[in-house]
Image: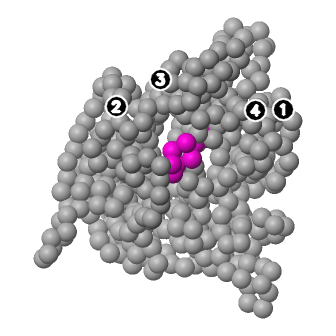
Amino acid sequence: MPKCSKSEKIEDALLWECPVGEILPNPSDYKSSLIALTAHNWLFRISATTGKVLEKIYLASYCKFRYLSWDTPQEVIAVKSAQNKGTVLARQAGIQQPVLLYLAVFHVLPFSLIGILEINKKIFGNVTDATLSHGILIVMYSSGLVRLYSFQAITEQFMQQKLDLGCACRWGGTAGTVGEAPFGIPCNIKITDTPPLLFEVSSLENAFQIGGHPWHYIITPNKKKQKGVFHICALKDNSLAKNGIQEMECCSLESDWIYFHPDASGRIIHVGPNQVKVLKLNEVENDSAQHQISEDFVILANREKNKNENLPTVTASGRVVKKNVNLLDDDPEQETFKIVDYEDELDLLSVVAVTQIDAEGKAHLDFHCNEYGTLLKSIPLVESWDVTYSHEVYFDRDLVLHIEQKPSRVFSCYVYQMVCDPGEEETTNRSCEKE
């Protein structure tokens, strides 16, 4: 069984588990697995319980793969390459690289190859980025235009040769084994003509979300003054939902954000510095053709009004100085929401709230009922939270991970495990730091 080198740098990772009742071809397919992408284009499938490498796949040498994404509804993993900008000499000479990036796509259960797709500017035009979601290839342009194509239709029309991991293959005069170094995986999906367009829309900074029942999408009108304004529209006819313009009345340095709820309920989560709105999409009464947006519940930050805020200041001479204080909604001295996530197995919303106390920031992780928004439990994080650093918090069943990136690429990882005793609940904390 292959082993992971200690010097191998992990670029990105995902976790999956086998569903109950599935019959899979290999015993290792039943193990909960961590998919890890290394800096040298290796894809590892690692047992989440033992850390043993179950599978090791070499992707390719013709590009640098960097990002992992999980298209959950399709049980598909997409590995995206860094964008191909060409060499400095080529750019100076005005030579444009036709291939912007590559997408390597795999089925999860069982783990198998679909193929590697290239995004070519000769076919799609002046593309700035592309991604895969809900079985749809989403292509983005610098103008704010977003175009959608069926990934299944693309594979059926443009797959040059079906490839299987571990099987011998001859490609371009070279023979090797698919997924083994140095042969890797050839780019076997090459689009030679513009595929049928499913949908297109223009949005500020390519911000585009799709979901809901029936299908709706969320965009920001493609004008800078509209930043922070979200339109929720029906996919079938582009009609704006009733109450479909959502704008959070907040004054903050960081923008609020919005997305369709990951629980596939068709709801929408809108997060601001001091509130989390969960919105629902319903049919308009007496008009099943139109839909409306309404609040399901709201989670508010715990803030107390500063008692000294409106007190006048009196100078030594007795002159009264009036203070005009306008705090930002994400002022660090007030409790501010930083991260909102959803744990599907426990059906909980997790919310990270941070408050800067003197020179030290303190954070706590709150668990809310996903159906009603009721606060169920609050866990204070032991470590301090510096708002100037980059933070990520992951919650999966009984484990909470807090990853903090400090200057000079120093990472700290704090691991919390929740333990339920007959008489009480408690959390334990372990931390590790690496450079």
Read off the residue under disc 3: 40
Mark 4 or 1: in front is: 4
Find out whether the residues at labels 3 and 4 contact each other: C-beta distance under 8 Å: no
Question: What type is the residue that disc 1 sits on?
Answer: Thr
Q: Is mark 4 on a helix, strand or loop?
A: loop
Mark found first going from the N terminus, 2 or 3: 2
Q: Is mark 1 on a helix, strand or loop?
A: loop
Q: Which residue is drawn at 70% across and 51% down?
A: 136
- Residue 109 falls within the magenta-colored stretch: yes
Q: Quadrant of the N terminus?
A: top left
Q: What element carries label 3?
A: loop
Judged left or right of residue 88, residue 423 is left
Residue 192 numbered tag: 1
- CA gap between label 2 and label 3 equals 19 Å
10 Å crowding of disc 4: few (<14), some (14-19), many (20+): some
Read off the residue under disc 2: 1
Q: Residue at x 65, y 69 (%)?
A: 212
Question: What type is the residue that disc 4 sits on?
Answer: Gln
10 Å crowding of disc 1: few (<14), some (14-19), many (20+): few
Which range is magenta? 104-112
Q: Residue at x 79, y 87 (%)?
A: 287
